[in-house]
Image: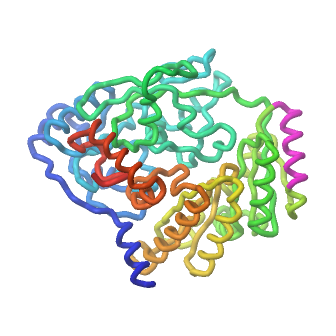
Amino acid sequence: MQDTVSGRAAAALPVVRQRPVPQALIETLQARFGARCSTAQAVREQHGSDESTFTVPPPAAVVFAQSSAEVAEVVDLCSQYEVPLIPYGAGSSLEGHLLAVQGGISLDLSRMDQVLSIDADDLTVTVQPGITRKRLNDELKSTGLFFPIDPGADASIGGMCATRASGTNAVRYGTMRENVLALEVVTADGKIVRTGTRARKSSAGYDLTRLMVGSEGTLGVITEITLRLYPLPEAVSAAVCSFPSIEAAVRTVIQTIQLGVPIARVELIDGNTVRMVNAHSKLSLREEPMLLMEFHGSPAGVKEQAETVQEIAAEFGGQAFEWASTPEERTRLWTARHNAYFAAIQSRPGCRVMSTDTCVPISRLADCLLDSVAEVDASGLPYFLVGHVGDGNFHFGYLIDANSAEERALAEDLNHKLVHRALQLDGTCSGEHGVGLHKMGFLVEEAGAGAVELMRTIKRALDPKNILNPGKIFDL
């Protein structure tokens, strides 16, 4: 058994195959971009690490682009020299998406951060990829509209497109897949193409927009995005509720969704995580499994939704309901969820977080989650548990000593069992984080060898030199 566990841990480590980066390319980029092409060690290391547990050598250089034309220039040069190019946004990815496993150039898009147009009548906005979701919503405040996709971190919109992100509001508003209408993309040969329009639907040709959303930078570099917007709800109410067990909390969620209550957010935090948050934020929350909920709509609609959910929760032993309707009160109630990651890290100084990302049909949520909790409790490995349980998505964060082969192996084994269980229940290995490096083996198990080979065929057709974020999603 131990050999199997160690084997899984070894298989999960990234394969590093550095490709040469000619000095002539570096010199050409420096001549063209000046100080915006950096080979400084600190800059390279910043762009060669993310929130995953992997350590990989940094890229050879970092280029800071300021326009689509500049992106096209960099891609064209990398194509000429057959050097890998890794798009970089906010650096908040969890699965090693931006790590330079084959070396190359990191292309930082964070300075392309403008709102290009707001079409309030059509409920759309067009932005550059470097703008973050919080800043986008700040720019939209005066319009009475907002962009609801909230993955937790203040990620860039380009990165959210690349990983097909979702988050706390997905149960009502969907994921990036449903909310991206059109893109501008630089292809592997340095050409600028557009996909989609601002129209709400289209039957014209292949759906290239959906192809690019979730491609993790392996098919093109996204340089412009048109998004759906939504009116700010007339009324918003939030609530927290404690439960005697995780099962009681999950059963409440399942019944709420199956009854068709249009809840906007419903997040699960287990008692273990509540204890961490109390210590981190000096709170006094009941240290029991907790649901955090939010309701959007008219005042009457919000009141009706909240009352319905409170009745359902009471059937499963839910208690200590606390309601909030003002922004300040809602922020206070949501502190536990927003601080969970940082509270967990503080609970074990120096640790790294190996995050899981399974998602299952809502009817199978209890089966998957409860068995997985029992496994990790029995293992003795420190962890935290949060979940966007309204759409069947939940995350264990295993708190490991990154230098301990034993702890890494144990975490990988727990993750393997969790993913295998989710797949048996018609679920997925990744509800929102993407495949990156960590889930490459799981993708084959989930989609099948034939489907993955079809993905390879698309990759080879669009990127024949394999320069766009190579070594991610699958091996060529």
Residue that appears at 49% across and 73% down: 411
Magenta span has 309?
yes
406 shown above or below 361: below
- In percent of width and height, residue 187 lies at 30, 32
Q: Label the magenta part by its dominant secondary structure.
A: helix
Quadrant of res 124: top right
Residue that appears at 19% across and 44% down: 83
Left or right of 381, for residue 363: right
Residue that appears at 35% across and 52% down: 472
**Span highlighted in magenta in the image:** 298-312
Q: Given the current orientation, which residue lies at the most extreme top position?
A: 121
Left or right of 304, for residue 294: left
Nearer to me, 75 or 6: 6
- In percent of width and height, residue 417 lies at 53, 70
Q: Given the current orientation, which residue lies at the most extreme front position?
A: 450
Quadrant of res 28: top left
Left or right of 142, for residue 284: right
Examine the rendering and report whether any part of residue 84 can be seen: yes
